[in-house]
Amino acid sequence: MTELEDLLQQRLLDRPSKALTMVVAAEAMVDGAVLDALFRLVYGGEDPLRWRVAWVLEKVSGERPSLVEGERCALMQLAMQTDIPDGMCRLLLGILHNLPDVNTLDVPFFNFLLDRMCDLQSPPGVQSLAMKLACRMSRVDPELYREFLCILRNMELDYYSAGVRAVVRHCLKNGK
């Protein structure tokens, strides 16, 4: 681990807070070395640290998505790992949701999103973000988009939270 990574690790684990997250995100937006160190930590750090780093990266992607866009594929791969906790998955999907749409479809990631949005064991935040991302990704192909809307229409909404039901309604409303 580099000295910068050690310093970031200390700061993020010592006294985590929203204010600290915003400060580190601001530093990452102006210093590429900090951003690179954060990416190394999110891919290879321990779980409590990875969660906090992902939280910082979610803030960066919300403010300056272009800084994170080059890591899209690696972030998708990380989100699809089976041992990723639901909270970490939600943060990674939040980062990916903040990135601009692309004109290509990553089939394994799309299938992962479909699985997570329909999985009743997934938390509502993961289900909702997976659904929003799948909706955007499916628009690449009109036939795939129609199939996605068909999946939504056939969901048994009584089993899902109010938030997930709202996302379903929003996707269906925009699909007409």
Image (tube, rainbow, N blue to C red):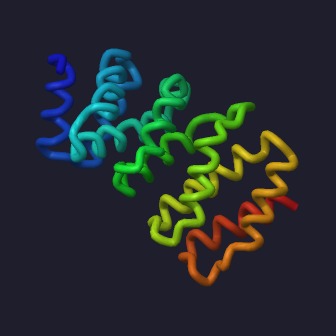
Q: Quadrant of residue 167?
A: bottom right
Query: On screen, 91 above or below 76?
Result: below
Relative image position of residue 45 (x, y in whole percent): 24, 35
Query: On screen, 22 above or below 120?
Result: above
**Residue that appears at 32% across and 34% down:** 42
Q: Residue 85 vs residue 49: left or right?
A: right
Q: Quadrant of residue 173?
A: bottom right
Relative image position of residue 47 (x, y in whole percent): 24, 45
**Residue that appears at 17% across and 21% down:** 1
Q: Looking at the image, which is closer to me, 131 or 59?
A: 131
Q: Looking at the image, which is closer to me, 43 or 65?
A: 43
Relative image position of residue 69 (x, y in whole percent): 54, 27
**Residue that appears at 58% across and 36% down:** 99
**Residue that appears at 21% across and 40% down:** 46
Query: On screen, 35 above or below 58?
Result: above
Q: Looking at the image, which is closer to me, 38 or 108?
A: 108
Q: Quadrant of residue 37?
A: top left
Q: How many marks?
A: 0
Indicate the quadrant containing the C terminus: top left, top right, bottom left or bottom right.
bottom right
Q: Residue 90 vs residue 22: left or right?
A: right
Relative image position of residue 38 (x, y in whole percent): 32, 28
